[in-house]
Amino acid sequence: MGTDMSSARPLSPLSAADLEDLRLARRLLENPGLTARMTNALGAPIERGLRALPKDWNARIDAIARAALTRAADAALFTLKDRPGEASSRIWHKFGAAASGGVGGFFGLAALTIELPVSTTVMLRSIADIARAEGESISSAGTRVACLEVFALGGRSGSDDGAESGYFAVRAALAKSVTDATQFLAAHHVAAEGAPVMVQLITRIAKRFGADVTSKAAAQAVPAIGAIGGAAINLAFINHFQDMARGHFIIRRLERAYGAETIKRAYEERP
């Protein structure tokens, strides 16, 4: 009996190395596990911290997340040299995040509005460093917006379903805001925080980032966490976003090589 060639699955156009990179990116992006990392860092369930948060916390978290992202967007990316392909260095950024987390852990929730913009700026700089290692030009408006986009990845809540929280679904939901912000930055060369397109993008990212900030705040609300616990929390926090960044910029590198639709299809086939 002959083989029905019309039903045969086409061979992937990706090289073996790129297919392995795609698998790695998918593992990083679809299994973020931030709450689990926070729990492991503390040795205590985050639910205890959630019960300790102020009753109006959910109303405050978006404002805190928006403020942190806005300050980081204007500060983080201008201290790196534009050298696409240069290897990233995660250690310094981990140290900076741990140090700011130590201060936050010592003072507890009261310090979050001060500490979060600092740690977010450190993380955004680390994200840009990872982008550069994957061949991105950090002077490019598209890269700068893609760095901010990382904060929307992996910010799942218990009410999310797979259709709403998958990597490509999040990118699709942000697509218009990302395009508008990229065009604005390309024309103006600065992340003017008051520009409507930047405000819209940061507001949309902050909604998802807020889920991760809530996990961080819950961890910091665990009684007697102290400076050492705060440092451990921020290490888990930055590890999470470094993983999201690596997955995101691997995908973008593969899209440049093979085309966005090819990579999306291969990603969704769970190679």
Image (cartoon, rainbow, N blue to C red):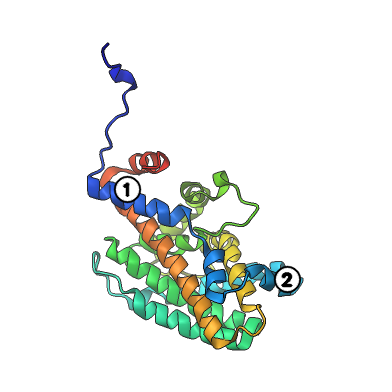
The residue sitting at 71% across, 71% down in the picture is 57
Q: Nearer the viewer, residue 220 or 190?
A: 220
In the image, residue 106 sits, relative to residue 35, either above or below, namely below
Mark 1 vs mark 2, foreground winner is 2
Q: Secondary structure at mark 2?
A: helix
Q: Which residue is mark 2?
A: 51
Q: Position of residue 171 (x, y in %)?
A: 47, 50
The residue sitting at 26% across, 42% down in the picture is 14
Mark number for residue 255? 1
Q: Quadrant of residue 150?
A: bottom left
Q: Say few, some or many: other residues with alpha carbon within 10 Å of mark 1 (under 14 / 14 to 19 / 20 or more).
A: some
Q: Nearer the viewer, residue 142 or 148?
A: 148
Q: In the image, is 83 to the left or to the right of 74?
A: left
Residue 195 shows up from this direction: no
Instruction: Say whether disc 1 or disc 2 marks the residue closer to the N-terminus.
Output: 2
Q: Position of residue 5 (x, y in %)?
A: 28, 19
Q: Position of residue 263 (x, y in %)?
A: 35, 43
Q: Say few, some or many: other residues with alpha carbon within 10 Å of mark 2 (under 14 / 14 to 19 / 20 or more).
A: few
Q: Secondary structure at mark 1?
A: helix
Residue that protrudes farthest toward the right in the picture: 55
The residue sitting at 28% across, 74% down in the picture is 81
In the image, residue 201 sits, relative to residue 60, either above or below, namely above
User: Could you tell me the amino acid type at mark 2?
Assistant: Arg
Q: Position of residue 198 (x, y in %)?
A: 51, 63
Q: Quadrant of the N terminus?
A: top left
Q: In the image, is 66 to the left or to the right of 7?
A: right
User: Could you tell me the amino acid type at mark 1?
Assistant: Glu
Q: Quadrant of the C terminus?
A: top left
The residue sitting at 26% across, 47% down in the picture is 257
Q: Quadrant of residue 53?
A: bottom right
